[in-house]
Amino acid sequence: MIEVVTFGCRLNAYESEAVKARAGEAGLDNAIIFNTCAVTAEAVRQSRQAIRKARRAHPAAKIIVTGCAAQTEPQTYSGMDEVDAVLGNAEKLEARSYFDLGERVRVNDIMSVRETASQFVDSFDGRARAFLQVQNGCDHRCTFCIIPYGRGNSRSVPMGAIVEEARRLTDRGFSEIVLTGVDLTAYGADLPGKHTLGQLVSKILKLVPAVKRLRISSIDSIEADPELMRAIAEEDRLMPHFHLSAQSGDDMILKRMKRRHSRKDTVAFCDAVRRLRPETSFGADLIAGFPTETDAMFENSLKLVDDAGLTFLHVFPYSARKGTPAARMPQINGAIIKERAARLRAKGEAALAARNASLIGTTQTLLMEKSGLGRTPCFMPVRSSGEPGTFADVRITNIEDNHLIAA
């Protein structure tokens, strides 16, 4: 038995499937592997709590810790009596790492990693959609972010390998593929020919007609290339849902974060995409309580939800990460951070409710994720009948517990 416990992003979810496959190839058995996240101190705390709980429940199992938190702070996990081995983000994707766990800590210099290979993951237990990693790492150094030190510099999977894996996934029965990465709009800059994310999207849709739905997990809107905008306008199989790495709605905070976009850029991108695909929905990462954030600056983030027409909010209460420039800036009181995060989440819930209400009476094509639940092209969850992995044309009749109800 190999169990992989995943924390964090979609890229981690993808890599967890690869981790399970590589550990299986090595013959590992009776093991629990924790694929950790380093985005916030809370994510690290939750992983440590889960490790302790797992050891109490499975005293004889091997417990291996990997992922971004293991990469950035291996000593945190190697110091836990419950942990048998700590593997870095590069090591976790190599079968040889699981053959011999005698070396308790194996975490290399992630900045020395220059390439990202396709993992050829073709099994996603319990999911109707499949993730496909196309890029890893990040060349930017936002002042709040520890992730480049967990993932390394930006590197792209060659386009041919991505197309081959997309074919494998559709052959396995997946109709929807989600492209994942740390900085997706940086795709191709390190490859011969300097390809772009838009070119990759067009190539997949052209060469793999069995892909019924293609999604992009998260993007920096300021880096959206012309080919991507053309694909949004012309390719019905590219789903009208985009998650933006916005982080704030205030220009001064964005500068202090060392982001590359302004508030105006986020609003302009959403407006431009809606002109091309009016049905598009947008999500966004937003940080509440970044150092030096005043009440007025926070209000600009609240207003961004309406001004950009955001539907899905992923709200992060600011968490100082040791070694980042933002950790040395004047910090906001924790109670204020918590209150601002709650207000942002409430704003997001209201935006989601309004979008749900706007779809009542419309006809939508669902991809059923599991029995009784499917999603629209714009990623809204709908309760409806249908077998997992199948498509269904339904009429939206009602809302119940933030889910649309289909006739």
Image (cartoon, rainbow, N blue to C red):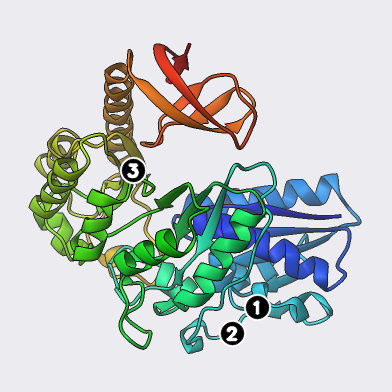
Q: Residue at x 69, y 65 (%)?
A: 19
Q: Is residue 260 visible?
A: yes
Residue identified by numbered label 3: 241
The residue carrying mark 2 is: 108
How far across and how far down the image is residue 262, in percent?
11, 57
Specify which label sits upstream in the sequence, 3 or 1. 1
Neighbor class of circle 3 (other Cα within 10 Å; few <14, some 14-19, many 20+) is: many
Badge 1 density bin: few <14, some 14–19, many ≥20, Cα 10 Å? many
Q: Is residue 200 found left or right of 371 in the rendered image?
A: left
Q: CA distance from mark 3 to mark 2?
A: 36 Å
Disc 3 element: strand
Give yes or no for contact between labels 3 and 2 (Cβ–Cβ under 8 Å).
no
Q: CA distance from mark 3 to mark 1?
A: 33 Å
Disc ID at residue 91 = 1
| Label located before the other in sequence (2 or 1) | 1
Tell us which disc is closer to us: 3 or 1.
Answer: 3
